[in-house]
């Protein structure tokens, strides 16, 4: 028994000796390596902490960006006025979140169009002329003011009396309608010659380089032969298009981008690009006088419906001569004016002055008793037969844009009101309007100093003259023959987004 116990004791002792030997050897190696043995745990902890800090910071930063994107998407669809006013639908951020599907797309509904453009029967006769049999235009500007001569204006120096007379419809009429001699917006002779053969026109426009032409789709071979697709541009936009897309030149010197024939307007008539864009949009009949029918579509839009089907649906089927879509949000001109101020679309005091003139002249807020579905259109698509009365309406509409603010939605319902129900038009549902095109973003955001003006004092204090337009909106600076100080604008209940 003793002999068995002794070996076990000796075995434990030998194991202790081995462990002591290993510890002493490690201690010597630690001393030999200096401080590295003591610092290694600190370095490991520091490295792990730094990596965790970077990861946490990246996660927080990503969450902040995602939160900002989601907030932007929500604000663009919010019914709360303050938040909806923060939305900028022309921004790169909005385009990004829209591509990610974070923004609800516009409501679309099917357009009750015919099945085959080749089966459309084009009317042999034009619509009968009603109320106006002959319409002519002033071509010279009477520019004498206080004994001095002023340069001619594209829209003319229209007096308050001339404006009032122009709304009195007679069988033979002569009105201002842009294109005053030496007022700007001249076309080259090659373009004048080309458009003379255009009886059916799809027109669009790009000014100040804010867009590039978008090629229409679903266009039948018949419509490609029947229609002229005319893209009106200024010199800045033409240069921008040449640098960014392929432009081909035909044997007559005409320039093309796909199906679009570029039409250059030299010497823009206005300081404000938005106002310049209203020239081809509203005065299509003046730019292309041989055209019998025209379809206007804004430059940032891609047409996706055959134009012949649009003419049949909106004009010929129910014998209309003018068709335009109803605004998505507003029917009341004073509500639309309020939205324009909230969205900073033009100087707030000038919008108020514009509306005071309309209110003084009897323009009532829209109500269901009115004969029109709305006083506010979506002006990005306009479908017209160029009758004398339709052309008169376009002239009077443009004159209001020339005299007051360039926001044409504010003037449309007023001109309808002043014509006393003589001008009939088809205002189609907004969901059909959204089904006519695909909307693209501008190549850059538009902004001008005048849009940020909050009071008339800012114009008075502006010594550079950069705020006040020199060739447009002169009706806002010409003494009005009435007491506008006594005018109280109707109250506006904000029941929708700013727009």
Image (spheres, helix red, strand yellow):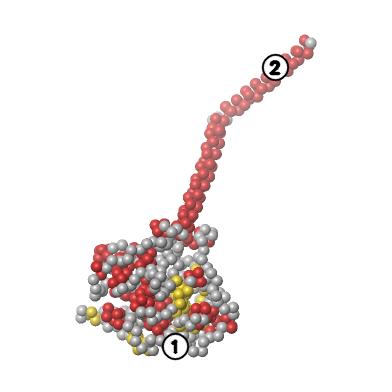
Among the 4 quarters of the image, the one containing residue 134: bottom left
- Quick check: can you spot residue 292? yes
The quadrant of the rendering that contains the C terminus is bottom left
361 or 105: nearer the viewer: 361
* Nearer-N-terminus badge (2/1): 2
Q: Residue furthest left?
A: 147
Q: Secondary structure at mark 2?
A: helix
Q: Residue furthest front?
A: 369
Describe residue 9's horizontal placement relative to residue 53 as left or right: right
**Residue 473: % across, % down:** 31, 73
Q: Which residue is mark 2?
A: 13
Viewer-closest of 372 and 174: 372
Q: Which tag is nearer the camera, tag 2 or tag 1?
A: 1
Q: Residue at x 56, y 83 (%)?
A: 120
- Location of residue 322 (image quadrant): bottom left
The reply, left or right, for residue 415 in relation to residue 121 is left
* Farthest residue, direction top: 2
- How far, Cα to Cα, is label 2 from label 1? 124 Å
Query: Residue 275: where, in percent of width, then height?
Result: 37, 73
User: Depth check: 75 or 259 in front?
Assistant: 75
Q: Is residue 264 in view?
A: no
The image quadrant where one finds the N terminus is top right
How crowded is the residue under tag 2: few (<14 C-alpha within 10 Å), some, or many (20+)? few
Disc 1 crowd rating (10 Å Cα; few below 14, some 14-19, many 20+) is few
**Residue drawn at 24 percent across, 81 percent down:** 144
Residue 128 image label: 1
């Amino acid at each position: 028994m003793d002999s068995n116990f002794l070996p076990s004791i000796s075995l434990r002792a030998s194991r202790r000796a081995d462990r002591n030997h290993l510890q002493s050897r490690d201690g010597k190696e630690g001393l030999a390596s200096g401080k590295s043995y003591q610092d290694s745990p600190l370095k490991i902890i520091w490295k792990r902490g730094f990596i965790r800090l970077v990861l946490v910071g990246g996660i927080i930063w990503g969450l902040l960006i995602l939160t900002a994107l989601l907030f932007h998407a929500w604000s663009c669809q919010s019914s709360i006025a303050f938040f909806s006013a923060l939305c900028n639908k022309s921004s790169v951020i909005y385009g990004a979140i829209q591509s990610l599907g974070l923004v609800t797309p516009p409501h679309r509904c099917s357009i009750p169009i015919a099945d085959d453009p080749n089966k459309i029967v084009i009317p042999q006769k034009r619509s009968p002329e009603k109320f106006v049999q002959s319409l002519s235009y002033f071509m010279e500007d009477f520019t004498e003011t206080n004994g001095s001569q002023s340069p001619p204006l594209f829209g003319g120096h229209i007096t308050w009396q001339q404006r009032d007379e122009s709304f009195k419809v007679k069988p033979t009429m002569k009105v201002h309608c842009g294109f005053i001699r030496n007022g700007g917006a001249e076309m080259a002779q090659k373009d004048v010659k080309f458009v003379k053969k255009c009886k059916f026109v799809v027109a669009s426009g790009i000014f100040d380089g804010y867009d590039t032409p978008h090629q229409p789709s679903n266009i039948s071979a018949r419509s490609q032969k029947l229609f002229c697709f005319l893209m009106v541009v200024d010199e800045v936009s033409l240069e921008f298009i040449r640098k960014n897309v392929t432009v081909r030149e035909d044997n007559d010197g005409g320039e093309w981008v796909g199906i679009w024939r570029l039409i250059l307007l030299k010497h823009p008539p206005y300081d404000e690009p938005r106002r310049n864009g209203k020239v081809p949009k509203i005065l299509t009949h003046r730019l292309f006088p041989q055209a019998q029918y025209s379809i206007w579509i804004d430059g940032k839009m891609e047409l996706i419906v055959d134009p012949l089907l649009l003419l049949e649906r909106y004009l010929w089927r129910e014998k209309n001569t003018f068709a335009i879509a109803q605004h998505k949000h507003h029917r009341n001109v004073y509500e639309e004016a309020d939205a324009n101020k909230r969205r900073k679309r033009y100087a707030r005091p000038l919008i108020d002055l514009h509306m005071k003139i309309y209110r003084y002249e009897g323009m009532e807020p829209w109500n269901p008793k009115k004969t029109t579905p709305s006083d506010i259109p979506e002006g990005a698509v306009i479908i017209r037969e160029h009758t004398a009365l339709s052309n008169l309406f376009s002239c009077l509409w443009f004159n209001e844009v020339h005299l007051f603010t360039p926001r044409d939605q504010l003037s449309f319902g007023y001109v309808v009101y002043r014509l006393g129900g003589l001008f009939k038009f088809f205002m189609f549902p907004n969901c059909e309007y959204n089904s006519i095109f695909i909307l693209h973003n501008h190549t850059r955001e538009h902004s001008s100093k005048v849009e940020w003006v909050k009071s008339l004092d800012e114009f008075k204090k502006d010594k550079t003259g950069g705020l006040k337009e020199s060739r447009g909106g002169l009706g806002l600076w010409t003494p009005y023959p009435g007491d506008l100080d006594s005018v109280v604008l109707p109250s506006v209940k904000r029941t929708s987004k700013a727009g």
